[in-house]
């Protein structure tokens, strides 16, 4: 006949350490949460002359669809409107298609924002 070993159970004295009340096992490896870095803001080139000699496709990729388009013979005027200003892009037909020959940036009535800042805001709002 096999005899089972005797098991003695005794209560442990209470502990003053609050962490001793936590029934979960202590961590074996520390885990660090991975937080992606804040996106780095790209500087905006606020010079409207950067549009000169660009193709119509590149202008559309940069600024999106124009608010208004006027066609006059082989020329087109694309107008982009923002709250503070209006940008007119004058495109002419050349051997490769439409390309920018002139830009005109003007303030809306009553606005006093510098033209370059307005163009930079227009670019930022389109991206």
Image (cartoon, grey):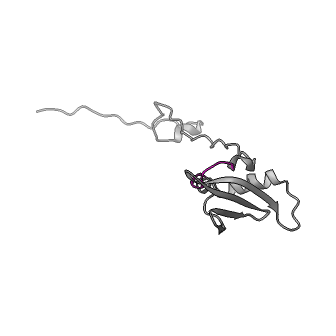
Above or below: residue 81 compared with residue 98: below
Where's residue 99, x and y in %? 62, 53
Magenta segment includes 26: no
68 relative to 21, above or below: below
Measuring 77% from the left and 65% from the top, which residue is drawn there? Answer: 83
Q: Is residue 14 visible?
A: no
Is there any visible trace of residue 65 in the rendered image? yes
Give residue 38's position: percent from left, percent from top: 63, 43
| Residue that appears at 34% across and 34% down | 8
Comparing 68 with 6, the one in front is 68
What is the magenta range? 52-58
Of residues 69 and 81, the one nearer the viewer is 69
Question: Observer-nearest residue: 24 or 84?
Answer: 84
Residue 55 is left or right of residue 77, and the answer is left
Image spot of residue 41 (x, y percent): 67, 44
**What residue is drawn where x is 45% and y is 38%?**
11
Please state the total of marks drawn on the protein image. Answer: 0
Instruction: Left or right? Give the position of 114 relative to 95.
Output: right
Q: Nearer the viewer, residue 16 or 70?
A: 70
Image quarter (top left, top right, bottom left or bottom right) of the C terminus:
bottom right
Q: Is residue 70 left or right of residue 107?
A: left
Q: Is 62 located above or below residue 26 in the figure?
A: below
State the residue lying farthest toward the left: 1
Residue 45, quarter of picture: top right
* Placement of the N terminus among the 4 image quadrants: top left
Residue 37: x and y, percent?
Answer: 60, 40
């Amino acid at each position: 006949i096999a005899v089972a070993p005797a098991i003695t159970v005794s209560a442990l004295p209470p502990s003053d350490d609050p962490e001793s009340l936590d029934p979960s096992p202590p961590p074996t490896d520390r885990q660090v949460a991975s937080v992606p870095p804040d996106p780095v803001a790209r500087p905006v080139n606020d010079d409207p002359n950067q549009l000169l000699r660009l193709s119509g496709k590149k202008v559309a990729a940069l600024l999106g669809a124009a608010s208004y388009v006027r066609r006059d013979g082989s020329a087109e005027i694309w107008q982009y409107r923002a709250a503070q200003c209006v940008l007119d892009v004058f495109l002419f037909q050349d051997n490769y298609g439409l390309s920018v020959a002139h830009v005109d940036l003007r303030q809306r009535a009553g606005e006093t924002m510098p033209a370059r800042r307005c163009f930079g805001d227009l670019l930022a709002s389109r991206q």
